[in-house]
Amino acid sequence: MEPVKEVLIILAFKTLLIFPAFGTQIKGTVTDENGNPLPGANVVVHELQKGTHSDADGGFLISGLKPGTYHIHITHVGFEAVSQFVRVDQGVREINIQMHATMLDLQSLMIEAYPFKSGPTEQSQTVLIVDREFVERYNAGTFANTLERLPGMATINTGVGISKPVIRGMSFNRIMVNDRGIKQEGQQWGADHGLEIDPFDVDRVEIIKGPASLIYGSDGMAGVINIKPAPLPEAPGVRGDWINSFRTNNNLLASSLRLEGRHKDFVFRARVTAQEFGDYKVPADEFIYATRRLPIFDNRLKNTAGKERHFSLMTGLRKSWGHTTITVSRFGQEAGLFRGAVGIPSRGDLRHDGSHRNIDLPYQNNEHWKVISNTNILLGNNWLEVDLGFQSNNREEHSWPHIHGIVGERPEGTLAMGWRLNTYTGNIRYHISDSERNQGILGAQLQGMENSHRGFEFLLPQFETYQAGIFYFHEYKLNHDLVINAGIRADGAQHRIYEHIMPDFYNENPGNDFMQRNPDIERDYFNFSGSLGLSWVYKHRFNAKLNLGSSFRIPTAIELASNGVHHGAFRHVVGNPELISERGYQADLNLSYKSKSFFVSLTPFLGIFDGYIYLAPSPRFSPMTGSSTIWEYRQNDAVFTGGEIRTEWNPFKGFKWTMGVEYVWNYNIDTRLPLPLTTPFSVLNNLEYRFPMVKGTFEDLFLFVQWRSTGAQNRVDRNELATPGYNLLEAGIGSKIDVFNHPIQIMISGQNLTNEMYFNHLSRYRLINLPEQGRNFSFSLKIPF
Amino acid sequence: MKKIFGLLLLVGLVGFMSCSDDDDAPGIVDLEAPVIGFAEGRDSYRPIDGEVRLANTDHMHVRFRVTDNAALGQVLVDIHAAFDGHTHGRLNNGEFELLNVKDIYSPTAENVIFRFPEGANSLNVDGSATDIYWGGPTSRVETNVLAGPYDFTISATDEAGNSTNFSNNSSYIATFYIQRPYAPVVTVTNLEDDELHGEEGQPLAIEGTIAITEHALASELAFVWVRLIEEDDHSHGRLSDEGHGEWIWGTSQWGDGMSGDPIPNGELLNLTEVFSGENAITLPNEHGHFELVFWIEDANGNVTREVFEVHVE
């Protein structure tokens, strides 16, 4: 045998023998700034959702990889999170990670949901991150209310159980909520339509402030809320936890059970949540409306109770080529509406009905089903992400026919309005990352929606909407301290809205038994948008980000074709089929400074909107019962500006002070008035102390005190009420207690401790002078197993 | 687009400085809603809150005036049932109906009675043509109006869209009561100076009847609800909740499922007999004026509401 052949055979044999066993590997060490090894760092291959921890010498090894490009995310408590781009070929690739010590909690979190898998300093937009601990600590019964504590965020509430998020003074269809990569679609145009997300089924939330149409499509004008699931279960076996909570104000009882596990490459996670609450208490025993002093029996707002049942189930496979998961979830909520809020409140309606837990008319019944598939596959050196979703939103609003001026009973019973909105979504993103310098994403999005309606009332017709968009986004790392990015996007959309004819209950046209509420409407829209951003780091401490972007939003079916009384708002709302796409030209700046124990960021923004669509009062009265004037969708040019300040200071170990300041100023250029529903100025201060570790008994014992000061909102649109300012005090204590080797987490907190009587400018109940929820104590218990 | 970019510069400069208030363009933007007041030469509205229209009349006077700093848009006079509950559509045999009025006064109103000149800054309503009838040739009901309480409201807008509002009390609201010859009648015969008299802590002596009339459309008594409450603070309507006793017989069509013992007699109740024994009206242990409020429904849904003052010594 020739020696060469022999060598080849041996090589081939070795290849067969060795490479399948070890494959491609990433081997590395994690050290601190002084080169000392850092054990216990969490090292995750982002694309594979696969990870390990560094050992006593700071070393780690990730094997079983295929050649390709990866992003390694390294996090460690007390150190700034690091994202490292790695390109590996056959064999072993060695990397060394140096981490910077920090006392700032904000800095130790990594952005995970942004499709661009670069680190926080490379982003040109402001991204807020909320982790599991934050979600659990501030769970206020709804997902949106949890986020309210972040600077620049607010909520539009209808009582306690129904709330929707607001970013920088914008809400409804101007912000986007993505759950597991799929845009949530659920009639979000309505002020009393809450966001259908189980508050317990949220692990991480990343909020991008500023225009995000470029990557996410129509509607992402003020920002995007990305809800991201927890990383895929790592350790083999089955684990879980059980959370129970109780709130005194509305006697809320919630229980949520989570189970997750991994067997070889197969992973699963399941969650079931049940939540029920009674009528909530306000610090008032009467309210004054239409010169009448109306009683609030027992300080509880009648018929504001609710009942919720949610579940989600995820299963998936994790391989060296990537991972794929499928998630099925259902949100179910039945929520009563305060009796006095439908029509002019009368005393008889406000009599105590003998129970604080029953749900009587009027009420809402909301159900949201989702089937979402997320796949990430390695193609050559690059990654292809495919997110597919089907959602079915079923919304029912029940009330008495006579409130709507209808004499007699109706075959629909009490169903005033019911809508089923089915949405099919497909998002494809191809990540092209040849080197750390040049990374790009080529993406395409498709969405189809169909809406049908039921009920004896009418507001929103049957319609179909189709949207498609393609974009390319590129990030270029000039040097270690300067990153620039740019993107372009093209979109097309079509609305097909069907004529609606219904019986003329109002007898508007004598002799004609039917009336047309809206005609057939067919509209096509085309939009181009672009963005340009940069992030510059100076001496590791200063970071300046600038983002210039154009955003767009196609008018919704409700804005084009509605014609009816939305009893949620007392208004007869009339759409305008001639509306064109709303366009925004937005500039966002983020200036931040950080030292080891101090962080401050200033994030001003300016947006000019061409054809901003909003509801404006007309001088005409509605002929329909239960409404006053007619409100029309109009389109005007508008300006939004303002900003946030955010600080974190850790003067000594365990002690933390954070502050968030927010302000929004807007102006309707055509009417020379502010726009309606603008978030008031507010300052949120939080002091927290984490006691030194006491092993065995109370671990992780912490205390916090939080004070929110909200200014008056006197900048109001025509016919909108100004709202005085208020102060809210909150405090809490939490700890882990070791019971039979199970670290049980307990927390007790109190909200609105001074029982302040105040109005929320954005609340739907503000319209009838109803104060917000009074003092509350929350108790929660988390039992892991 | 040009004006947008011009404003971009302006707002960029002004935006961050003008954190406080809204006086961007003083005097240019009209934000004043119309004002609703008494009709010219009158010293009150019609109807006023609590006004009772006796069984022998068939209409309600409507008297008010609306003025605006610029030009009026529209004025709405609305009347709807305030029966404190929900009909569930049971209006017997089509013999009765609720009074439902939505009169919109505007420069383009179809009916000339409701028309006013475009650009007008005031509208005075005080005439028989705009009064509201439930009988006679201009009746607003086709059959017979259901007796009972009705909410009467006035709202107004100006051309710019500014509107009066119930939250800040700039719209007008009053409840008035329609009595009809076919509705039940409450008669109290032992009044002195229009008041009932009693001593604190003692049962109230009351004489009289609750009866149905001999009208062809009269029907049996279905619900009797009597309350003893603090004398009304009239500035806030009839809504104080300080009850000193409540007596219920029968089942209400209107009040949300309210019900008590069966009514002893569907045609005639003697007040002395009814309020005796365990049903005696025991007066509170304090001097002062109280009100005894009767709410009587017949089987057709007609409501008769009568209030008697009680003087406690």
Image: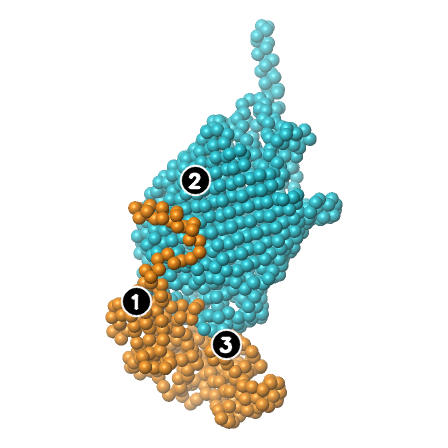
Chain colours: A cyan, B orange
Q: Which of marks 3 and 1 is in front?
A: 1
| Residue drawn at x 72%, y 48% as measured from the top left | A698
Amino acid on which disc 2 is placed: Asn
Work out whether mark 3 precedes mark 1 in sequence or the reverse, and give the earlier one: 1
Badge 3 element: loop
Name the residue carrying label 1: B70
| Residue drawn at x 44%, y 33% as measured from the top left | A484
Q: Which chain carries label 1?
A: B
Q: Which of A380 and B126 is in front in this view?
A: B126
Q: Which of B27 and A301 is in front in this view?
A: B27
Name the residue carrying label 3: B239
Image coordinates of residue B313 in percent, x first then y, are: 58, 90
Residue A525 placement, left or right of A737: left
Residue B50 can be seen in this image: yes
Distance (Cα) linking label 2 and label 3: 57 Å
> On screen, A471 above or below A712?
above
> On screen, A51 above or below A577?
above
Q: Which of marks 2 and 3 is in front?
A: 2
Image coordinates of residue A408 in percent, x first then y, are: 41, 71
Image coordinates of residue A750 in percent, x first then y, are: 62, 57
Quadrant where the image shows the C terminus of chain A: top right
Residues at badges 3 and 1 in contact (C-beta under 8 Å)?
A: no
Give residue A547's mark: 2
Q: How crowded is mark 1: few (under 14 residues within 10 Å), some or many (20 or more)?
A: some
